[in-house]
C-alpha cells in the first residue's frame, strides 16, 4: 500500500470539504447561485476569492438557470469551470444541465442533495439527483466529507479526459454531510495541482484562429448520431474512472471502486445504498456480525455510469440484498437504484432475492433500528417467510 | 443526387461545427410562404432592408446616385419573414404568395 499524502488534518463540514477541494483545484470560473443546503460551498468559496487565495473569476448570477448557462459559456471557452447547487436549484437549471452534457463540457458540480418541492422542504433526499440521472452527467456519491473532498478532485480528471468530456456531479447528503463537521485529511495544494494538471480543452470558443460553432441546430439527420457519441463517452468513462481511481489511490493509499464492499466477502445479507446512509448501514452490519449474522454493506460510489457486471460481481454470493432508495420514483416498481440492481441480475442463473426500501424522504431520519429491521426482513425472507418486495422505511402508518 | 450523411464516429462531438462560415450551405428558402418582390427602379438606397434582414438575403448593387441599391432577394436563404417590406420607407417591397410563382424552379428545402 502506498503512503498516504492526505497529511493535513482539518475539521470540515461536507460543504467546506467541497469548497476546500475547489480552492486547491483553483478553477478558472465558478458561476453559482446560493440555495440551501449548498450555500456554505458558495459562501466559503467566495471568501477564498475575496481573500485572493484563488485566481477564479466568480460569477454571481441571478438564478441557477443562469449559473449553469454561465458555466456552459465558460467551459465552451476552454475555462476549467465549477459550480454547486441543490434540489429546486438543480430543477431550475435542468434544461442547461442537459445542454452541458450534450455539448460535452467537462464542468464539475457539487450537488448537495435535498428534497424537491412540494411541499417545500430543505432537507436531504436524492430526488434532485434522480431528476437528472439520465442527463448524461457522471455521478459520484459521497459517504462523508472525506469522500466529497476526494471525489471532487477526481471529478476534474474524469470530466476532462479526452475520451470522456462529460460533466461530473459529486453528490453529498444535505445537512447530514454538508453541515456536519468531521475530520478530513487533505493534500497540500501542490499535490492537487500536480494531480489535476493543466486543462487543455478540445475546443475553445475564444480561439479566433480556429473559429467554431457551438450549440447549432441539429435536426433528425444528425441529433441521433450526437446522442450515440454520448453513449460512447459514458462507456469510455467506465474505463477512465477505473484508471483515475488507480492513479488517485497512489496518493491516498486507499482503494476505490464503482461499488465498494464492506464485509461482503462472505455476507449472506447485503444492504446496497449511497451517500451518508452507508455509514449507518456499516454500523448495523458490525452489530449483526458480532452476533454471528453475516451482514454486509455495498456502497455505491459511481451511480452514473451504472455498471451492472460490477455490482453482480459484488453481490452474487449473497442470499438476500436490500436496496435503499432515498428518492421516490412514482409509478415505478420500487426505487431507481433497486431497479438498476435488479435489472443487473436478469441474465444471471444464480441470483439473490432483492428487496426495495424507500427511506429518508425530506430528511426523515434513517435510524439504526430501521436498518436492523431491514436485515431482519432479509433473514426472514431467507428462512421462507413472506416479505413485501417494495417497502417504505420510517413513514408513519 | 442523395447527399452522403456521416456516421456517428465521423462527426465532431457535441454538435460542434469546426469550420466557420458555412451557414450559406444551409438553404432555408424552402420555408417561405410569402416572397418579397422589389421594385428596384424605385429604390432610394436607404439600405434599411439590408440592415434589418435576419438572413442577409438582400442583394445590393453599387449605384452612382445612392452608393448602393437593393436589386433583388437571395431566394435560397430568404425565409419570407417580411421585415424588409415592413421597414421599407418608400413601400417598394411587396410580399406575394409563393403559389404565384409555383411554375418557377423550386428551392430545395435542405436541413444540413
Image (tube, rainbow, N blue to C red):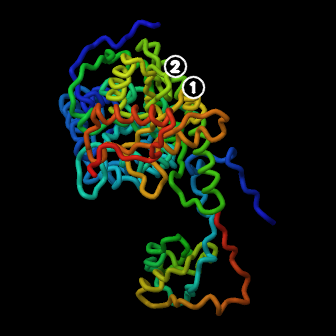
C-alpha gap between disc 1 and disc 2: 7 Å
Residue that label 2 marks: A266
Outermost residue toward the front in this view: A384
- Secondary structure type for disc 1: loop
Q: Residue at x 27, y 58 (%)?
A: A118
Query: Which residue occupies the foreground of this view, A153 or A205?
Result: A153
Tell me which chain the residue with mark 2 is part of.
Answer: A
Residue that label 1 marks: A317
**Quadrant of the image for the C terminus of chain B?**
bottom right
Q: Is residue A30 visible?
A: yes
Answer few, some or many: residues within 10 Å of disc 2's Cα (few below 14, many 20 plus, some between 14 and 19). few
Q: Quadrant of residue B109?
A: bottom right
Q: Residue at x 49, y 31 (%)?
A: A158
- Image marks 1 and 2: residues in contact by CB distance under 8 Å: yes
Query: Which residue occupies the foreground of this view, A301 or A213?
Result: A301
Residue A142: percent from the left, percent from the top?
37, 31
Query: If you read the primary sequence from the N terminus, does the residue marked by circle 1 or circle 2 appear first?
Result: 2
Query: Which residue occupies the foreground of this view, A384 or B26?
Result: A384
Answer few, some or many: residues within 10 Å of disc 1's Cα (few below 14, many 20 plus, some between 14 and 19). some
- Looking at the picture, do discs 1 and 2 lie on one chain? yes
Q: Is residue A252 above or below residue B3?
A: above
**Quadrant of the image for the N terminus of chain B?**
bottom right
Amino acid at each position: 500500500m502506498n503512503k498516504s499524502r492526505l497529511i493535513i488534518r482539518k475539521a470540515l463540514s461536507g460543504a467546506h470539504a467541497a469548497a476546500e477541494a475547489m480552492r486547491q483545484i483553483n478553477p478558472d470560473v465558478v458561476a453559482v447561485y446560493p440555495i440551501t443546503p449548498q450555500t456554505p460551498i458558495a459562501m466559503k468559496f467566495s471568501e477564498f476569492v475575496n481573500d485572493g487565495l484563488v485566481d477564479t473569476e466568480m460569477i454571481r448570477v441571478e438564478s441557477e438557470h443562469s449559473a449553469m448557462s454561465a458555466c456552459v459559456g465558460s467551459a465552451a471557452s476552454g475555462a476549467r469551470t465549477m459550480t454547486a447547487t441543490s434540489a429546486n436549484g438543480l430543477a431550475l437549471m435542468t434544461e442547461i444541465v442537459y445542454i452541458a452534457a450534450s455539448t460535452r463540457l467537462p464542468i464539475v458540480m457539487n450537488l448537495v442533495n435535498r428534497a424537491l418541492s412540494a411541499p417545500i422542504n430543505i432537507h436531504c433526499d436524492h430526488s434532485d439527483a434522480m431528476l437528472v440521472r439520465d442527463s448524461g452527467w457522471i455521478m459520484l456519491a459521497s459517504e462523508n466529507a472525506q469522500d466529497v473532498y476526494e471525489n471532487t478532485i477526481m471529478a476534474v480528471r474524469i470530466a476532462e479526459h479526452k475520451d470522456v468530456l462529460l460533466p461530473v456531479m459529486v453528490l453529498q447528503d444535505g445537512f447530514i454531510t454538508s453541515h456536519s463537521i468531521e475530520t478530513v485529511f487533505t493534500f497540500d495544494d501542490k499535490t492537487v495541482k500536480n494531480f489535476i494538471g493543466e486543462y487543455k480543452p478540445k475546443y475553445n470558443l475564444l480561439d479566433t484562429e480556429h473559429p467554431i460553432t457551438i450549440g447549432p441546430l441539429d435536426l433528425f439527420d444528425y441529433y441521433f448520431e450526437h446522442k450515440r457519441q454520448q453513449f460512447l463517452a459514458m462507456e469510455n468513462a467506465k474505463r477512465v474512472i477505473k484508471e483515475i481511481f488507480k492513479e488517485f489511490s497512489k496518493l491516498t493509499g486507499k482503494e476505490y471502486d464503482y461499488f465498494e464492499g464492506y464485509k461482503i466477502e462472505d455476507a449472506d445479507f447485503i444492504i446496497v445504498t449511497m451517500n451518508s446512509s452507508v455509514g449507518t448501514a456499516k454500523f448495523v452490519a458490525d452489530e449483526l456480525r458480532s452476533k454471528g449474522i453475516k451482514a454486509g454493506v455495498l456502497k455505491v460510489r459511481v451511480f452514473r455510469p451504472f455498471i451492472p457486471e460490477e455490482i453482480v460481481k459484488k453481490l452474487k454470493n449473497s442470499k438476500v440484498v436490500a436496496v435503499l432508495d432515498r428518492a421516490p420514483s412514482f409509478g415505478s416498481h420500487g426505487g431507481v437504484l433497486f431497479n438498476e440492481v435488479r435489472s443487473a441480475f436478469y441474465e444471471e442463473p444464480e441470483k439473490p432475492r432483492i428487496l426495495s426500501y424507500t427511506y429518508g424522504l425530506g430528511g426523515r431520519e434513517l435510524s439504526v433500528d430501521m436498518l436492523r429491521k431491514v436485515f431482519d426482513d432479509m433473514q426472514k425472507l431467507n428462512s421462507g417467510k413472506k416479505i413485501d418486495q417494495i417497502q417504505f422505511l420510517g413513514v408513519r402508518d | 443526387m442523395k447527399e452522403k450523411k456521416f456516421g456517428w464516429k465521423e462527426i465532431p462531438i457535441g454538435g460542434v461545427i469546426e469550420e466557420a462560415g458555412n451557414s450559406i450551405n444551409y438553404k432555408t428558402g424552402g420555408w417561405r410562404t410569402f416572397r418579397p418582390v422589389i421594385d428596384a427602379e424605385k429604390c432610394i438606397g436607404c439600405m434599411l432592408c439590408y440592415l434589418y434582414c435576419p438572413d442577409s438575403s438582400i442583394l445590393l448593387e453599387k449605384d452612382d446616385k445612392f452608393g448602393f441599391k437593393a436589386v433583388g432577394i437571395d431566394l435560397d436563404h430568404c425565409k419570407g419573414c417580411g421585415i424588409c417590406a415592413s421597414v421599407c420607407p418608400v413601400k417598394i417591397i411587396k410580399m406575394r404568395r409563393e403559389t404565384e410563382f409555383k411554375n418557377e424552379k423550386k428551392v430545395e428545402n435542405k436541413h444540413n
